[in-house]
Image: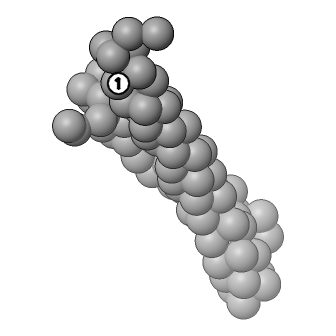
């Protein structure tokens, strides 16, 4: 094994680790981005429907708004994470 080969392995492992952590970060961020608006809209819509007697109007309206909001956020975050993935770790 030459000196050049031994120096490449730790760099590759740290680069791999960076990509693994980026994947976990994306998973967590997208999970929260999808779940939080949906759960909030469901709970608030159910509360408002009970209070105002409009079942199921408010829950449907708020879930639709949450869906659109989530779609916009996911697309924006996907572009940001794509740039991070393309650029790779800063060295």
| As drawn, 3 above or below 20 | above
- Please, is residue 87 above or below residue 31 in the view? above
Q: Position of residue 44 (x, y in %)?
A: 65, 78
Check disc 1: other Cα within 10 Å, few if <14, some if 14-19, many if 20+: few
Residue furthest out toward the top: 1
Which residue is drawn at the image coordinates 20% and 37% (left, top)?
Answer: 91
Question: Which residue in the protein does label 1 denote?
Answer: 7
Of all residues shown, which one is farthest toward the left?
A: 91
Residue 66 locus on image (x, y percent): 54, 55
Q: Farthest residue to the bottom: give it.
A: 51
* Image x and y of residue 81, in percent: 37, 35
Task: Report which quarter residue 87 is drawn in.
Answer: top left
Q: Nearer the viewer, residue 78 or 14?
A: 14
Question: In this view of the protein, which residue sits in the foreground, 43 or 19?
Answer: 19
**Label 1 secondary element:** helix
From this viewpoint, is residue 19 visible?
no
Quadrant of the image occupied by residue 60: bottom right
Structure colour scheme: one colour
Give the left or right position of residue 75, taking residue 47 as reference: left
């Amino acid at each position: 094994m030459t000196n050049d080969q031994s120096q490449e392995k730790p760099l590759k492992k740290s680069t791999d680790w960076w990509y693994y952590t980026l994947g976990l970060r994306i998973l967590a961020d997208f999970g929260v981005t999808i779940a939080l608006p949906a759960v909030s809209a469901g709970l608030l819509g159910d509360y408002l429907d009970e209070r105002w007697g409009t079942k199921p109007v408010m829950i449907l309206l708020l879930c639709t708004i949450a869906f659109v909001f989530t779609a916009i956020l996911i697309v924006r975050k996907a572009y940001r994470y794509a740039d991070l993935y393309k650029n790779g770790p800063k060295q």
